[in-house]
Image (spheres, rainbow, N blue to C red):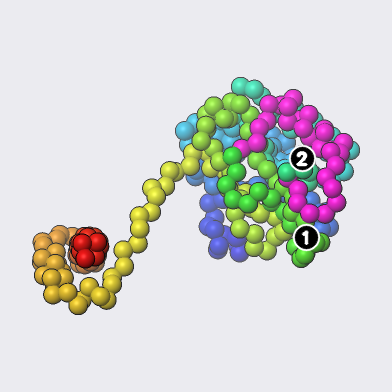
Amino acid sequence: MDVNRLVGGDWDYLHCPAVGNSGGLLALWKKDVMKFEVMATDEQVLIGKVLLPNLQEWIVAVVYAKKDYHACRSLWNVIGNFINGNLPVIVGGDFNCCLDQSEKKGGQKYKYTVGAQEMSAFLVDNDLHDLVILGPRYTWSNNKTGNSKIWVRLDRILMNSEGLRLAPLVTVKHLVRLASDHYPLLLFLAPTLQKPEGRWLRFEDIWMSYPVTWKIVWKNWTKQDYGLPADVLNGKCHRTLRALFFWSRNRLKELGELKNLL
């Protein structure tokens, strides 16, 4: 009831509960947007086939790996059995392992352990690749201060070559940490290219000391506008402020030329 009140009741989910304070996986998907067919569940991974609105099928694996590399061997085998080179694949989550020194800061010197070697071999054997990252480099911190603080990249999202072919602009954004010691990861299959924001135009009190500005305001404010009252008001304000701004910029340019002449 609490979840339905917060996010609505049009979600379906699959849950593998935690054992004590460790483990636990939860996958949620909107029933009216996509279909998620569960293919396998394990204490370290949820695997399913996603059918997107454009009828593309993707294999998705949600991972929460154990620290013990012996236990991770079964994880690599489970995921590898469902990877098909003809279908796009996404594998993401907490792998509890970093692959080189650049993915760790602080603490003891990095060691290329057996677990890291086996994970690297798993990525090569299954044609899985790291994605472009936006945001902080590391994804986990021990939340200590000073020399005791450790940063590690434990979480990642991987994709195979077929997925990269279908979504060449795919990116992963590391969001802000709130209650967790991990950064949430947000995957953009087709990111929207944001138009760069222009410079903020601000009204300058000094403009009122020039009589010509009153005429500029009157000329731009009396132009005919159409639409809702709020839209008309915003349009008049925007047009008038731009006119004042460009007048001011030209005025300063003229003053600069006069100063050089003097």
Q: Nearer the viewer, residue 4 or 214?
A: 214
In screen coordinates, is 104 left or right of 253? right
Q: Is residue 113 magenta?
A: yes
Q: Disc 1 marks which residue?
A: 149
In screen coordinates, is 236 left or right of 4? left
Query: Residue furthest toward the front?
Result: 262
Coordinates of residue 91 in the picture (x, y in percent): 67, 37
Residue span colored magenta: 103-131
Say which quadrant the C terminus sits in.
Answer: bottom left
Q: Disc 2 marks which residue?
A: 100
Residue drawn 72% across the image and 36% down it:
40
| Residue 76, placed above or below residue 211 | above
Q: Is residue 189 magenta?
A: no
Q: Nearer the viewer, residue 16 or 111?
A: 111
Q: Which class describes the residues within 10 Å of circle 2: few (<14), some (14-19), or many (20+)?
A: few
Coordinates of residue 77 in the picture (x, y in percent): 80, 30
Residue type for callout 2: Asp
Coordinates of residue 74 in the picture (x, y in percent): 83, 35
Q: Is mark 2 on a helix, strand or loop?
A: loop
Residue type for callout 1: Lys
Is residue 8 visible to the viewer in this orientation of the structure? yes
